[in-house]
Image (cartoon, rainbow, N blue to C red):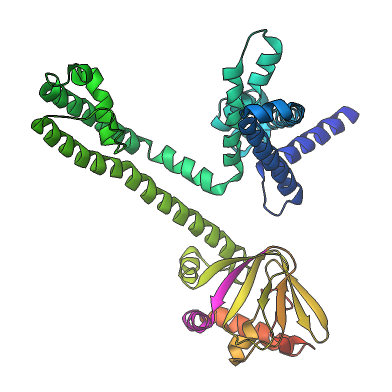
Amino acid sequence: MISRRRHADLLRWRRRVCNILDGAGTSDRVALLVHSVLVVFVIVSVGAVVLESVPELARTQETLFIVIEIVAVTVFTIEYGLRLWSAPDHTACADLPPWRARLKFVITASAIVDLLSVLPIYFALILPIDLKFLLLLRLARFFKLARYSPGMRSLAAVLEAERKALLATGIVLFGLVLVAASVMHLVEHDAQPDKFGSIPAAMWWAVVTLTTVGYGDVIPVTVLGRIVAGITMFMGLMTLALPIGIVATAFAQEIHRREFVVTWSMIAAVPLFKSLNATEIADIMRYLRAQTIPAEATIVRRGDPADAMYFITSGEVEIALQSGPLRLSEGQFFGEMGLLRRSHRSATVRAVQATKLLVLDAADFHALIERNADIGRRIEAVARERAEVPGAGYGVATDVAD
């Protein structure tokens, strides 16, 4: 019985560690703290590696650099061990045996980066040879930031999704390098045998020209060579625009898709909209916009025109009523009375903590209740109930609309 209880406790702790390291929820303060600490260690350790390359700093601050490295390696080693231990609780590995889940984790790109960021240090301690070139792999820690950056994760997803198109443009670019080098070899090898005497030698000029770098160390001197060079430059501009356009378009689509999913989930989580089907939610998405409010920021002020109502999807707000402060949290909404009465705000509302809202502007509010009479009736019913509560004249919601 005791061993089973200990095993259950161990599994529970492992799941908790997995949630903390993976940041299962932005509202998890422990996960946010751990991620913040890890990000600080990454930035400090990478900065130390860069500054250590300055001879004067390496000589005067040697002890500081050693301490930073020891602490960083210790933290990153513990992090890697905990990630490896909690790998069976990852969503992608839920159906795998523990050993296979850990093996799958080890070969992921993020795990390889984690390992490369600490492994050279252990090699340097064990092997009696100069491994300075391996120690430069400490800079791989910079890529650990991708785990905590949604933007970098989106970019990585874009590169993965468009890898075939990017590979095709790379093949086209290499083909242009080969053709340009071959043609330039034919027209310039007699005039400049030292620079265009062979196709491999001419490929340096082709690469520099197609990428529009133009070092000027190798240039054509014949008229025909300059004509070929001009055509090559234009081809380079057009070819390099292809991968840029592919990545930019795919990145914009990825961001739009993520925003769509986030907004959809936020709307579906609001109790007032839970009974709606997918078509109705998609229709409401045209009216609502997401907004993130930092802690202690004022959302609306007393006396301002009532230009919107707000649905709380996460966080907490406080309304300054004459009868005392009132706090609303996830699933509740406020500001509807001002819209129904077409009046001014009668209370100031501020965010107690970082809060995510869905904002419904006044014009869209009236358009929505006209299009969806059921939602309009429910909002008005809640407003009437609150009007009977002392302090409800301040135009805020004191309960969730069911």
**Which residue is found at the position 46% from the left and 70% from the top?**
286
User: x, y percentage for residue 395?
Assistant: 69, 85
Where the C terminus falls, by quadrant? bottom right
**Which residue is found at the position 78% from the left and 87% from the top?**
391
User: x, y percentage for residue 53?
Assistant: 61, 28
135 shown above or below 291 = above
Nearest the eye: 232 or 110: 232
Nearest the eye: 292 or 72: 72
Q: Give the mark count.
A: 0
User: x, y percentage for residue 28?
Assistant: 73, 51
Residue projecting furthest to the left: 224
Quadrant hosting residue 61: top right
Extent of the magenta region: 355-372
Residue 19 visible in the current orientation? no
User: x, y percentage for residue 319?
Assistant: 75, 78
Nearest the eye: 62 or 379: 62
Nearest the eye: 59 or 167: 59
